[in-house]
Image: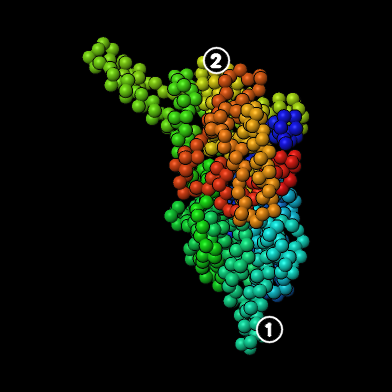
């Protein structure tokens, strides 16, 4: 049992900066007019490519490990390439791949190639931004993936924002069908699975039209004109457990985007008579296409939107729509705050914390400073300030009502009351990005403590409460190594760190790279409390319950990891985390304040997916995988997936 000195290696380690790798981003562009239309109207033959670039660049936050684009040219003649792909690695991948694509266009133009056969000038564009959620890296894992064939309608480009929890199950099914996937990853397996059903659809049409007397090019054209993409994706998608937005295009001109039945991962689209575009985030479409928010639609859970070779747009319910489990963590942390609804939600997340913050500072607003860190928490900070301001106004009204309007100095007293304001300051500034990996041990921690600069002269020594809001506190690494140590230099009486999200207690398996139990400071705190209170048998019994289900069908598995947290109130775990991130050198009292799950749902009512915080996974695969994560932690295999 992992207790005391036998805790897994690195259990109390805070050696890596707190960076969440999260879900990928997708972008699709389907031109609905001939290519010369865009050149005449917009002055460039690269209209579609330029729109794809904007959609991807505006989603740069979603993928800094790699990016890829694909293009299908529907007018290419036999003997010429018609499916193009460019992929790159690293944070500069977007610029790199688009530069390469444009260089290929220019080189082809200079060699006087047929304008119908220029690379990366086509009717269909697909883009993908990648953040690994599997720990697998390299160009071979960057989307889009491509399945080649000598018949245009059997070629398949595929990319997605997804994570499939039952890869083994789907892999077995693919193998049973007689296939032999080259790589064991959910993307490759889905590519081969969808490709198999694309082949079946082609064969169905081949048999049908061959029997009607068609042959040769006429037969090929009949097949391409009648591909039913809904047939292609309906059967394989029934086997997928997870959160997904899957995008595909065949070589003859059909495209599709399919969203998971719980709506875990997001997808938005815009359509007019010139173009169809889709992306993971709504404001990027608004910006790229210069359209109003009401012109952009959200793809509903279980729906697929399909555009045929001839530009016909169809929306169809491919999978039964299940309970709404749209991801709340995405709204808190990952999505662009420029979205109108997300901006309101993040403000309300901050405002909902008002009472907890007031309690943490003993209602002493005269000696309290409000601030935020990092910059992504600024919108929640605005909401927090509004909440505190409203509380102050109520106090002011009560104080004014107590005054005697006939007493000497009444106007001055009114002015004094109205001038009272809680102080709001920019306290911490991320000025430089230090390469802390070049150092080890104490020297590395010393470097980490200088990642942020602080504003001196604003905090009254040993008097002020310093309240800092963050959008989430997941691992606690940056708090311990950097933020608390930096803020303590200002000599506040108390440091109150506020999280606009609830305690992250459980791994995610639907697209965000949080898959190991020991990553979470809430889990480490709960384990520490169990150890301190002599409740070690709870860890063993939880392990045995999880282990007993290891070979069960995912549909029968129960999330027993919840039992680790059950004995403790949220505040107990928060207090323990505060203790764990407060080193002996810290002079100020440190408190942590977390959003409640109720406050979360109040602020984000339309995105109730809260499994990170509650352990209520939206699919059976989540329960199976969280139990496995606990088994791996207990057995000392934290890196096993």
Q: Is 214 in front, or is 402?
A: 402
Give the residue displayed 25% in from the left and 12% down from the top.
Answer: 407
| Residue position marked by numbered label 1 in the rendering | 216
Depicted 18 relative to depicted 93: above or below? above
Residue 138 in view, yes or no: yes
Answer few, some or many: residues within 10 Å of disc 1's Cα (few below 14, many 20 plus, some between 14 and 19): few
Q: Is 146 in front, or is 198?
A: 198
- Residue 200 lies in quadrant: bottom right
| Residue position marked by numbered label 2 in the rendering | 461
Q: Position of residue 590 (x, y in %)?
A: 57, 23
Give the residue displayed 58% in from the left and 31% down from the top.
Answer: 573
In what quadrant of the picture does the N terminus appear?
top right
- Residue 505 lies in quadrant: top right
Of labels 1 and 2, the one closer to you? 2
Q: Position of residue 281 (x, y in %)?
A: 54, 51
Helix, strand, or loop for circle 2? loop
Q: Where is residue 140 in the image (x, y as percent from the top left)?
A: 74, 55
**Pointer 1 with pointer 2, Cβ within 8 A:** no
Report the Cα–Cα distance between label 1 and label 2.
86 Å
Query: Does residue 503 appear to the left or right of 251 in the view shown?
Result: left
Residue extending farthest to the bottom is: 213
Q: Where is residue 76 in the image (x, y as percent from the top left)?
A: 66, 71
Helix, strand, or loop for circle 1? helix
Tag 2 or tag 1, which sits nearer the N-term? 1
- Residue 233 lies in quadrant: bottom right
């Amino acid at each position: 049992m992992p207790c005391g000195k036998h805790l897994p290696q690195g259990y109390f380690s805070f050696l890596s900066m707190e960076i969440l790798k999260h879900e990928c981003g997708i972008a699709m562009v389907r031109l609905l007019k001939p290519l010369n239309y865009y050149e005449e109207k917009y002055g460039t033959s690269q209209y579609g490519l330029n729109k794809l670039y904007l959609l991807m660049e505006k989603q740069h936050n979603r993928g800094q490990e790699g990016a890829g684009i694909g293009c299908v040219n529907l007018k290419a003649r036999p003997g010429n390439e018609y499916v193009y792909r460019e992929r790159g690695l690293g944070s500069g991948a977007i610029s790199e791949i688009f530069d390469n694509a444009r260089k290929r266009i220019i080189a082809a133009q200079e060699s006087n190639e047929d304008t119908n056969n220029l690379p990366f000038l086509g009717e269909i564009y697909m883009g993908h931004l990648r953040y690994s959620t599997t720990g697998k890296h390299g160009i071979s894992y960057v989307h889009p993936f491509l399945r080649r064939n000598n018949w245009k309608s059997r070629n398949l480009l595929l990319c997605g924002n997804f994570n499939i929890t039952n890869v083994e199950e789907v892999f077995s099914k693919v193998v049973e069908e007689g296939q032999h996937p080259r790589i064991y990853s959910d993307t490759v397996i889905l590519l081969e699975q969808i490709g198999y059903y694309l082949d079946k659809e082609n064969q169905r049409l081949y048999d049908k039209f061959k029997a009607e007397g068609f042959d040769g090019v006429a037969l090929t054209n009949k097949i391409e004109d009648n591909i039913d993409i809904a047939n292609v994706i309906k059967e394989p998608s029934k086997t997928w457990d997870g959160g997904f937005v899957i995008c595909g295009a065949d070589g003859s001109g059909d495209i599709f985007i399919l969203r998971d039945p719980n709506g875990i991962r997001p997808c938005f689209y815009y359509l007019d008579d010139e173009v169809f575009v889709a992306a993971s985030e709504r404001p990027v479409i608004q910006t790229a296409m210069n359209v109003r928010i009401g012109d952009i639609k959200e793809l509903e859970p279980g729906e697929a939107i399909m555009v045929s070779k001839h530009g016909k747009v169809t929306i169809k319910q491919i999978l039964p729509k299940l309970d709404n489990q749209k991801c709340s963590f995405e709204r808190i942390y990952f999505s662009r705050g420029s979205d109108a609804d997300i901006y309101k939600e993040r403000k309300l997340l901050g405002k909902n914390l008002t009472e907890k913050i007031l309690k943490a500072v003993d209602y002493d607003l005269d000696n309290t400073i409000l601030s935020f860190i990092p910059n992504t928490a600024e919108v929640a900070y605005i909401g927090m300030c509004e909440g505190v301001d409203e509380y102050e106004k109520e106090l002011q009204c009560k104080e004014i009502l107590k005054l005697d309007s006939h007493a000497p100095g009444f106007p001055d007293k009114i002015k004094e009351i109205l001038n009272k304001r809680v102080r709001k300051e920019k306290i911490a500034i991320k000025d430089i990005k230090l390469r802390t990996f070049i150092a080890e041990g104490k020297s590395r921690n010393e470097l980490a403590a200088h990642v942020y600069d602080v504003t001196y002269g604003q905090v009254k020594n040993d008097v002020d409460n310093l309240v800092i809001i963050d959008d989430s506190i997941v691992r606690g690494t940056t708090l311990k190594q950097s933020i608390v140590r930096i803020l303590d230099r200002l000599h506040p009486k108390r440091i109150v760190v506020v999280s606009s999200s609830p305690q992250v207690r459980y791994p995610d398996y639907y697209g965000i790279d949080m898959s190991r139990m020991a990553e979470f400071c809430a889990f480490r705190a709960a384990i520490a409390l169990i150890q301190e209170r002599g409740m070690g048998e709870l860890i063993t019994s939880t392990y045995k319950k999880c282990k007993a289900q290891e070979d069960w069908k995912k549909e029968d598995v129960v999330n027993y990891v919840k039992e680790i947290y059950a004995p403790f109130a949220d505040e107990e775990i928060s207090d323990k985390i505060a203790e764990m991130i407060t080193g002996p050198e810290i002079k100020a009292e440190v408190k942590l304040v977390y959003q409640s799950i109720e406050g979360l749902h109040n602020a984000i009512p339309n995105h109730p997916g809260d499994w990170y915080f509650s352990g209520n996974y939206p699919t059976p695969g989540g329960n199976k995988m969280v139990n496995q994560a606990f088994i791996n932690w207990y057995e000392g295999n934290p890196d096993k997936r």
